[in-house]
Image (tube, coloured by chain):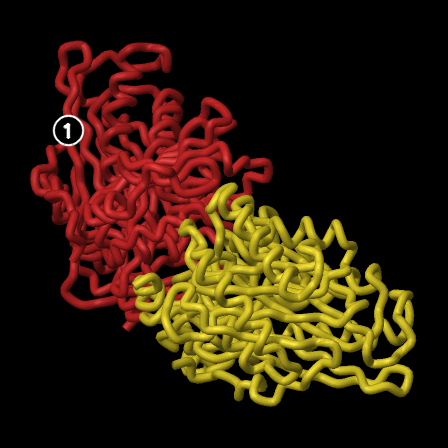
Chain colours: A red, B yellow
Amino acid sequence: MPVNLVAPEAHSLLPVPGVALGIAKANIRKPDRKDMLVISLAEGTRVAGVFTTNRFCAAPVTVCKAHLSKTDGDIRALVVNTGNANAGTGVAGLEKAYATCSELARLLQLSPEQVLPFSTGVILEPLPMDRLLAGLPQCVADLGNSNWLDAAEAIMTTDIVPKGVSRQITLDGKVVTVTGISKGSGMIHPNMATMLGYVATDAAISQGALQALVDHAVNRSFNCITVDGDTSTNDSFIVMATGKAGNAEIVEVASAAFQQLQDAITEVAVELAQAIVRDGEGATKFMTIQIESGKDVDECRKVAYAIAHSPLVKTAFFASDPNLGRILAAIGYAGVDDLDVNAMQLYLGDVLVAEHGGRAASYVEEQGAAVMQEAEITVRVVLNRGQASATVWTCDFSYDYVRINADYRS
Amino acid sequence: MPVNLVAPEAHSLLPVPGVALGIAKANIRKPDRKDMLVISLAEGTRVAGVFTTNRFCAAPVTVCKAHLSKTDGDIRALVVNTGNANAGTGVAGLEKAYATCSELARLLQLSPEQVLPFSTGVILEPLPMDRLLAGLPQCVADLGNSNWLDAAEAIMTTDIVPKGVSRQITLDGKVVTVTGISKGSGMIHPNMATMLGYVATDAAISQGALQALVDHAVNRSFNCITVDGDTSTNDSFIVMATGKAGNAEIVEVASAAFQQLQDAITEVAVELAQAIVRDGEGATKFMTIQIESGKDVDECRKVAYAIAHSPLVKTAFFASDPNLGRILAAIGYAGVDDLDVNAMQLYLGDVLVAEHGGRAASYVEEQGAAVMQEAEITVRVVLNRGQASATVWTCDFSYDYVRINADYRS
C-alpha cells in the first residue's frame, strides 16, 4: 500500500450540469467488479482530446480520432471498458469498437459518430463483445449526475485508489465546475501503462478554444509523467464542456476567461496525473524531478526522464539509500552531448549534493540520508547553461512492482 | 541464483604468453575479497580500447584515453580496482587516477603514460588512495601467467560468477591463444551498470589493425547488450596483443589472418558479453531479441531495445506469462514513426504469435506458454520492410533485481 497516497478527493466530486454517468459490472475479464462506464453529454457539449502516438494504437483510439474529426466535437457519449484493451486486435477489433458505438448510439438515440469508445486492460486478446453489449443497457439505466466516484472506480485496472478532483471558479458571475477522473498506475516506466483522463466542465467555450486548452493542460500534466511519443496503446485525455454554466462562450484564447478556465482545468489535470504517480504500481515514494537552466525544454526533459526512468535510481529511493552517484550517471547518459558536467549542481531536497563534477565540499551523507527518509522527494538539477526548465513526476521501484506485473494476468 | 548460467569456462582459461596477472585483497570497500588486479604486458604489446560515452565518464576513463593517445598503444600495464568507481569525483579523482599510474609505473619501471587505470563500484565517493596504493605491491608480487581465474574474480562486483573464455587458432602454423575476462551484471537496463572486458592474445598485429578489430568485436558483442551512447560512467573494453606467438605481424585488414583473428576475438567478446547477461542481477531467463527485415540497422536496434528495456515485458518473462501484447506495445512506441504494424510478424521461439496487426489465427496460448517455460527464449520480430537486422541479448526482471539494487551499498 503506497504510504503517501493523498486522501482521495474522489469521494467529494462535484456534479457537472449536463454530464450523466452510468456504470455496470459486465464481467469483461473478472466477475463482480465495476468494469464499464458510459458518460452521456447534453446537446451542445464541446469535446476535445489528445491520444497516444503509439504505432500499435488500440482500435478504440482509431475510432475516437475518426469520430472527433467527423463531428468536429459534437460528441454526445463516451463508453469505457476495463479488462481488455482491444489493442493488437486487427480489423476485428476495429469492427468491435465501431459496433460498440452503434449499439450505444441506438440506446441513446444518437448517431454512431457521436460516441467515443475507450478500452484498457490486456492487449492482444479479443474483446468479449457479448458481455460488453450486455453491459451497455445497464450503464444507460444507471445514468445519473452524481456517479463520479463510481465512474472513477469503474475505469480502474491495477489502480489501488479511485482518482478524482473537482474545482470551482467564477466566470461572468456564474459558478463554473470542473470535475475530472483518471486511471493508470504502471508508472515505473510511464510510457507503458495506459492512462485515461476525463475532465468535464459546464463552462461554455468554442471548439477551437477548447482544443487549445486541452493541448496546454496535457503538456503540463499527463505529458510530464510520460515521454512524448512513447505512450501506451490506449492513452487518452478528454475534456468535455457542456456550456450549462451560463457564462458567455469563451472564444478568444487571449481572454481573461480563457486563462481562468485553462488554469482550473490544468490544475485538475495536474492533480489527476500526480495521483497516477502516487498510485504507481508498488510505489512508496513520490519523486519530483526538476531540471533548471537548460538550453531548451527538450534537453531538460531528456535529463529528467533519464533520472526518472533509471531502475538503479528508483531502487535506491525505494531503499532510502542516498546512492546519488546513480543520479549523476543518469544525467551523464541522458543524451545531452555537449553537457559540461563540471558546471552543474545536483540538489536532493534543499541539500547541495554535487558540483564541479564531484561531491559538494559541504555535503555530508547524513543530510542526504535524512531527505531520503521522506515520502515526497524533490531531485533538482541546475544545468547552468540557459533559461529553460522542465519537471517530471515519478515514483520509486519496489518489490511490489515486480509482483504486480508478474501477476497481472493471473 | 540464475538457473541458466553456463558452466564457467573461467576455470580453464589458457595463459597468454607475454601477459602476467597479479591480484590483491586491498580492502577498497569490503574486507577479505579480491578487489585489485594488475596486468603486466611484455614489451612490444599493442593495446587498443573502446570506452563509455557517458558525459560523467569516470576519472580513470579520462586517463586511459589520454595515455592511449600519448603512447599510441605502447601500454605495458593495466590496474583495476573494484569497490569504488572513482566517478563523479572531480579534479581530486583525476589526480588519484594519475597517481595510481605513477606508483604502478615506479614499481614496474615504466613511465606513468604506459599504465591504464580502471575502477568499478560506487560512484561519487572518494577513492581510498592509501588502501589502493598499499594493494599495488601485493599485485606486483603476485604477477603470474596462470592467474586468469583469480583475475576474473578480482574484477567482480555484484557478479555471481567469474566470467572468462579462451580460444585457440593457428596463424602461419603457430598456435595463437585468445583469453578474455569480463565483469558486469546490472543488466536490467544495461546502460547503467559498469561493464569491463579485457581480452589478450599473443598474436602479432599492428596498432591500426588492432583498433579496427576492437571496433568490430565490440559492435557485435558488448554493444549488443548496451545502447550506443547510453553507457555507464566506467564501461571499458580493452584488447591486448603481445606478439609472442611468432606469426607474421598482421597489418592488412583485408588479409585472411586478420579475418581469422578478428573472428576468434569477436567470438570471445560475444561469449563474455552474453555471460554478463546470463549473470544479470536476479536473472532467471536469457532472452535473444532478434529483429529482421527492417529498413536499416538503426530502426532494428530501436525496436530490439524497446522490447529489451520494457519492465512490463521483462516481468512477464519472469512470470513465464505469455502476455505478449506487452511486446506489441513496445514495438509500437519504439520510435519507428512510419512502422506499419499490420505488415509485421511476431514470433516467440518458433511460434507465430501475431500478424496483420493482431493475434495470429493459428496461435493458441498453450504454445506461447510452453515456450515461456524455457530458460533461453528468442523473441523474433519480422518487420517486412527491408533487408536490415539486429540482435540484442537481455534477461528477465525478478524480485531479486530489486533486492540486489536496493541493498547494493549496504
Q: Secondary structure at mark 1?
A: loop
Q: Would residue A140 be visible to someone looking at this image?
A: no
As displayed, is residue A42 above or below residue B377? above
As displayed, is residue B179 above or below residue A161? below
Q: Characterize the local packing of mark 1: few (<14), some (14-19) or many (20 or more) Cα atoms within 10 angstroms.
A: many
Q: Which residue is mark 1?
A: A17
Badge 1 amino acid = Pro
The image quadrant that residue B25 belongs to is bottom left
Instruction: Give percent across and percent down for residue A183.
Output: 26, 48
User: Numbered disc 1: what chain?
Assistant: A
Horizontal side, residue B69 vs residue B274: left or right: right
Q: Residue at x 35, y 25 (%)?
A: A213
Seen from the viewer's position, the closer of residues A122 and B326 is B326
Horizontal side, residue A253 vs residue B189: left or right: left
The image quadrant that residue B130 belongs to is bottom left
**Quadrant containing the N terminus of chain A in the rendered view:** bottom left
Instruction: Give percent across and percent down for residue A304.
Output: 41, 40
